[in-house]
Image: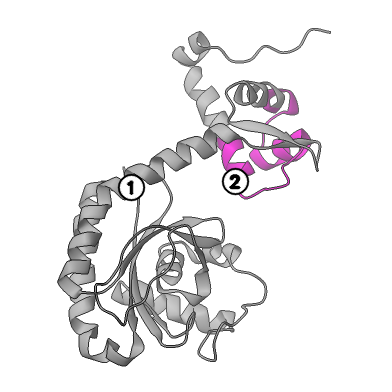
């Protein structure tokens, strides 16, 4: 029996090629977050397509490196080419927004962090450290839980409630005595974040550190967050100024990233 052919570049150039791209996109979205992969039958059920069609599109995606075999399930998972593109996009985000976070850090004399939503955590991709001796600094590349951090809560609030809930663990583990451990309480706080436009971490991730965070929508990539961690002992005296400056930076950065609705 002959194997089904993969879609070629000439096929994609035809009017039906738009359908091929849409099907490929739906398959990639279905695999997002499935670290152990999905079988072809599971993929077909997820995307509502015949298994033969899924098989054909998956073979084309494998050829390009967008999906790869998943040894644990016998199916497929997202491949290295997508990871490479994602890393390139992060570099572009960092390059585009670094002057803005550097200007915000200079204005506040505080550390400013840039992070992206990655699965069920936020990952720090850039930072401008405060020149003060008493300062809050995290490592670029580090990840924070969504429910314990200002940047995490900002991106959660930027998502529909059902999507935000899907990213949260069943049990919200605390880091400090101030950590939120109730999903109901967290949802109430996310409503407040949506209303006012920024999120707080009030010594919930680290004792002695309070932070403010805002989210940005990148039309071509993951949700992005800018956060300002400040030692708790001086937070009250700078809170209003820090919020105003952070919201102004958010507006400038969103203009740089483009209209999220396009």
Q: Name the spot of residue 146 as percent of width and height, x first.
A: 51, 69
Q: Name the spot of residue 186 as percent of width and height, x first.
A: 51, 80
Residue at x 67% of width, y 11% of height: 5
Q: Residue furthest right?
A: 1
**Magenta segment: does it hold 96?**
no
CB-based contact (under 8 Å), mark 2 and mark 1: no
**Quadrant of the snapshot with the C terminus:** top left
| Mark 1 Cα shell of 10 Å, populated few (<14), some (14-19), many (≥20) | many
Residue at x 68% of width, y 21% of height: 56
The residue indicated by pointer 1 is 93
Q: Quadrant of residue 88?
A: top left
Q: Name the spot of residue 21 as percent of width and height, x first.
A: 51, 26
Q: Is residue 210 above or below residue 125?
A: below
For the record, the magenta segment spans 26-54
Nearer the observer, 101 or 129: 129
| Mark 2 Cα shell of 10 Å, populated few (<14), some (14-19), many (≥20) | few
Residue at x 64% of width, y 25% of height: 62
Colour convention? one colour
The residue indicated by pointer 2 is 32
The kind of secondary structure element at disc 2 is loop
Q: Residue furthest left?
A: 107
Q: Is residue 65 above or below residue 126?
A: above
Q: Would residue 260 be seen by someone viewing this image from the given angle?
A: no
Residue at x 53% of width, y 36% of height: 82
Q: Earlier in the sequence, mark 2 or mark 1?
A: 2
Q: Would residue 223 be seen by someone viewing this image from the given angle?
A: yes
Q: Name the spot of residue 244 as percent of width and height, x first.
A: 18, 75
Marks 2/1: CA–CA distance: 21 Å
Q: Is residue 38 above or below residue 216?
A: above
How many tags in the picture? Answer: 2
User: Would you say 15 lies left or right of 128 here?
Assistant: right
């Amino acid at each position: 029996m002959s194997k089904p052919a993969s879609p070629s570049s000439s096929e994609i150039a035809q009017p039906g090629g738009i359908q091929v791209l849409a099907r490929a996109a739906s398959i990639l979205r279905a695999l997002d977050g499935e670290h152990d992969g999905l079988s072809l039958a599971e993929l077909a059920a997820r995307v509502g397509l015949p298994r033969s069609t899924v098989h054909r599109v998956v073979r084309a995606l494998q050829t390009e490196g967008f999906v790869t075999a998943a040894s644990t399930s016998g199916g497929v998972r997202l491949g290295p080419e997508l990871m490479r593109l994602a890393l390139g996009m992060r570099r572009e985000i960092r390059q585009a927004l670094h002057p803005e976070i550097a200007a915000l850090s200079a204005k506040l004399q505080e550390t400013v962090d840039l992070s992206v939503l990655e699965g069920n955590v936020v990952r720090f991709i850039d930072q401008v450290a405060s020149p003060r001796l008493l300062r809050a600094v995290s490592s670029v590349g580090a990840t924070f839980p969504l429910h314990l951090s200002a940047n995490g809560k900002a991106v959660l609030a930027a998502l529909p409630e059902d999507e935000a809930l899907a990213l949260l663990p069943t049990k919200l583990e605390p880091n400090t005595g101030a950590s939120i451990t109730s999903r109901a309480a967290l949802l109430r706080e996310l409503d407040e974040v949506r209303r006012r436009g920024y999120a707080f971490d009030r010594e919930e991730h680290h004792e002695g550190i309070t932070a403010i965070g805002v989210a940005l929508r990148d039309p071509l990539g993951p949700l992005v967050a800018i956060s300002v961690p400040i030692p708790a002992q001086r937070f009250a005296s700078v809170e209003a100024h820090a919020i105003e400056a952070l919201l102004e930076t958010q507006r400038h950065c969103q203009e740089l990233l483009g209209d999220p609705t396009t």
